[in-house]
Image (cartoon, helix red, strand yellow):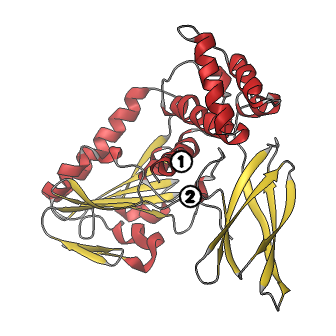
Amino acid sequence: EQAREQRRMMLLGYAVYVRPDTDYPVARFRHKSDQKDNAIGYQKAAMIFHMLRREIGDEAFWAGLRKLVADHGGSYAAWSDLERVFAEAGRTNLRWFFAQWVERAGAPDLKIADAVHRDDSPTIGGFNLRVRLAQDEPLYRLRLRVAVKMAGGRIHTARLQMESADQTFTLPVPARPLSLQIDPDFETFRRLGREQLPPMLNLFVTDRERTVVLPTGGTEVERAPYQELAARLAAEKQGQGSKTKPATVQATDQDAGASRGSVLVLGGPGVNRGADWAARGCGSGVSLERDRFTVDGRTYEGPTMALLLSCRHADRSDHVVTLFYGLTPAAAAKVARLLFFYGWQSYLVFRDGAVVAVLGGEATQHR
């Protein structure tokens, strides 16, 4: 489970920080200067080793590592050296593997184009699930695991070999299939579309367009921690001086609904009139009040409580709306100084500045 979660975070990091127009091959990585480099040079490279292990098997993989150390210990090795060593250990040609994963920029973008089932044999009770998968150009050769959730709660898994842009598979399953998930354990490096990702603060941080909605209600003391946070965010972006950095627009709570891109609403009910609008994309499971809030069926109240909540934009699913507020100015101030360290979850509840509840959804392919 720990390894699965780490792989999931690697895919999320790549999806959040590496846009297709700024991507580059792992072979060109030299050093880390930002989160994009980290996602390519460390996270994608780590996933390449994981996929290589699955491709040639454990015995050949560990033998190849031992050979690599024996041949190059104390010196530099190139990716071509790795290709040669692992190809010899696995007794297979790995040219295609290193060409698509190391020398080419990008990652496969997979979609479930269609999934239907029919009753194969009423007397036996089996089903045939026909699955059509699609990938965009350039094409990748992929070894995919899929998981089928069946009636009764059981999970049926299968491994598929995909090599074309549009490929249909027939999977015999023992019970009625309810849903299909591609790569449930995140073992294949791939690009997750931003609309597939769970809503989170980091999607606001990396959006090309983004708006901070400032409060105009409440007292000056109540508004202060949010105004200080907005000023710090503006100063940080100004100081970076990069033309590629997202532009941040400031708006007041009268204009929250007309805000561009992803939106960060600062302040809750009674302080920021955009708070209730911000929670629209989260559905009925979220209720906000000036002295309490309810998330995921649980109500939190008291002067030390604060909430960081991210929802899908109600009108534009490729953007997110994030709300941050404390039930008192002191509760908000304790979290505000470290707010952007909490970028990966859909919501976090804080008591006296410490996290007491967290929810982070998974990015998946279902049908």
Q: Is residue 110 left or right of residue 169?
A: left
> Residue 347 or 98: which is nearer the viewer?
98
* Residue 230 visible at all: yes
Report if the CB atoms under discs 2 and 1 are less than 8 Å apart: yes
Q: Is residue 35 left or right of residue 356?
A: right
- Asked if 100 appears above or below 280 in the picture, the reply is above
Indicate the secondary structure of the residue bearing disc 2.
loop
- Name the residue beneath numbered marker 1: 12
At label 1, which amino acid type do we have? Leu
Residue 133, given in percent of the width and then of the height, sits at 79, 60
How far is the residue under mark 2 from the one under mark 1? Answer: 8 Å
| Number of numbered tags placed on the structure image | 2
Q: Residue furthest bottom?
A: 123
* Residue 244 visible at all: no
Q: Residue at x 33, y 34 (%)?
A: 235
Residue 274, given in percent of the width and then of the height, sits at 36, 66
User: Where the C terminus falls, by quadrant?
Assistant: bottom right
Q: Residues within 10 Å of mark 2 (few under 14, many from 20)?
A: many
Q: Residue at x 57, y 18 (%)?
A: 30
Q: Residue at x 50, y 44 (%)?
A: 206
At label 2, which amino acid type do we have? Ala
Residue 225, given in percent of the width and then of the height, sits at 20, 50
- Asked if 141 appears above or below 288 in the picture, the reply is above
Residue 1, given in percent of the width and then of the height, sits at 47, 54
Indicate the secondary structure of the residue bearing disc 1.
helix
Q: Residues within 10 Å of mark 1 (few under 14, many from 20)?
A: many
> Residue 240 or 30: which is nearer the viewer?
30
Q: Between disc 2 and disc 1, whose residue precedes? A: 1
- Name the residue beneath numbered marker 2: 363
Q: Residue at x 57, y 46 (%)?
A: 11
